[in-house]
Image (cartoon, helix red, strand yellow):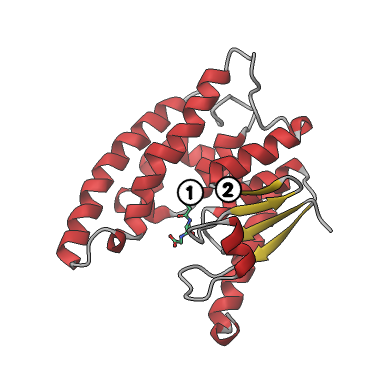
Amino acid sequence: MPDYTLYCAPDTYAMGAHAVLEEAGADYAVHWVHLFSDNPDPDFLAASPHCRTPALKGPDGTVFETGAVALYVAEGHPKAGLVIPPGDPRRGTFLQWFHYLASTLQPDVIIQYHPEFYHSEPDRQAALKAASMQRLKGVYQTLERALEGGPFFFGSQPTVPDYILALQTVWDVIFPEGDITAYPNISRHRAAICARPAVQRIRAAHEAEYTRRRQAPASK
Ligand SMILES: N[C@@H](CCC(=O)N[C@@H](CS)C(=O)NCC(=O)O)C(=O)O
């Protein structure tokens, strides 16, 4: 029995937490789930009250929210060096970027994918997406500056916020005109995280599950 079970849907926020589990060398299994289901998997529902991924079942119980899952796993595997610990002068900056990604970047990313969560009329959806993209431009400028020294938030040491950021920037549609190249530091950051063998492994697993579902929708 593995230490952790990650409830995961392919090509979703679950990738950030998945990458941290893999990078930390944790003993885990993936439990693939379906979103927006009228009959959610009971184990998934027990771990994630809104049936959103990621969620984790671990030795101490369940945890949901990308940031909580990723930090919980990273703190449980200190040798992996994915956390700037309390007492380190960079700790405040670490917490700042960790929370910025969850509370400032993520809500507008979700609007780019799901404006229908907020409006049913197509015109209002388009207006919401456009306004949200304006806000995202400001976020990307801030991240550009933060990653200037790079490639990661803390130079050459990748930490939890790097995985959470890059496993969102893999989605080109979250950038203006769908083009990340206007942001060279974010592009370099994404490339550096995506080149890591642990990240390549989890992305391949997501791609395989995504492809499997497309080819065999009846078995969803
Ligand atoms: N704040 C949550 C958001 C998770 C989230 O919205 N995940 C999406 C997949 S990318 C999801 O499960 N959506 C299904 C739904 O909203 O019902 C987190 O970071 O874990």
Give, as a three-letter code, the residue at label 1.
Gln
Residue 174's spot in the image, x, y percent?
A: 37, 51
Q: Residue at x 62, y 32 (%)?
A: 159
Residue 191's spot in the image, x, y percent?
A: 56, 44
Q: Secondary structure at mark 2?
A: helix
Instruction: Name the image quarter holding the N terminus.
Output: bottom right
Q: Is residue 59 left or right of residue 220?
A: right
Q: Is mark 2 within 8 Å of ligand 1?
A: yes
Q: Is residue 199 visible?
A: yes
Q: Foreground: 13 or 181?
A: 13
Residue corresponding to mark 2: 16
Asked whether the residues under the numbered discs 1 and 2 touch, taking CB atoms below 8 Å apart as contact, a structural biologist would say yes
Q: Residues within 10 Å of mark 2 (few under 14, many from 20)?
A: many
Q: Residue at x 65, y 48 (%)?
A: 19
Whether 202 is drawn above or below 40: the answer is above
Residue corresponding to mark 1: 168
The quarter of the displayed image where residue 112 is located: bottom left
- Which of disc 2 and disc 1 is earlier in sequence? 2
Instruction: Name the image quarter holding the C terminus.
Output: bottom right
Give, as a three-letter code, the residue at label 2.
Gly
Q: Is residue 81 left or right of residue 172?
A: right
Residue 38's spot in the image, x, y percent?
A: 47, 75
Q: Is residue 147 visible?
A: no
Whether 145 is drawn above or below 129: the answer is above
Q: Residue at x 48, y 73 (%)?
A: 37
Whether 189 is drawn above or below 122: the answer is above
Residue 76's spot in the image, x, y percent?
A: 74, 36
Furthest residue to the left?
123
Furthest residue to the bottom?
218
The CA distance from mark 1 to mark 2 is 8 Å
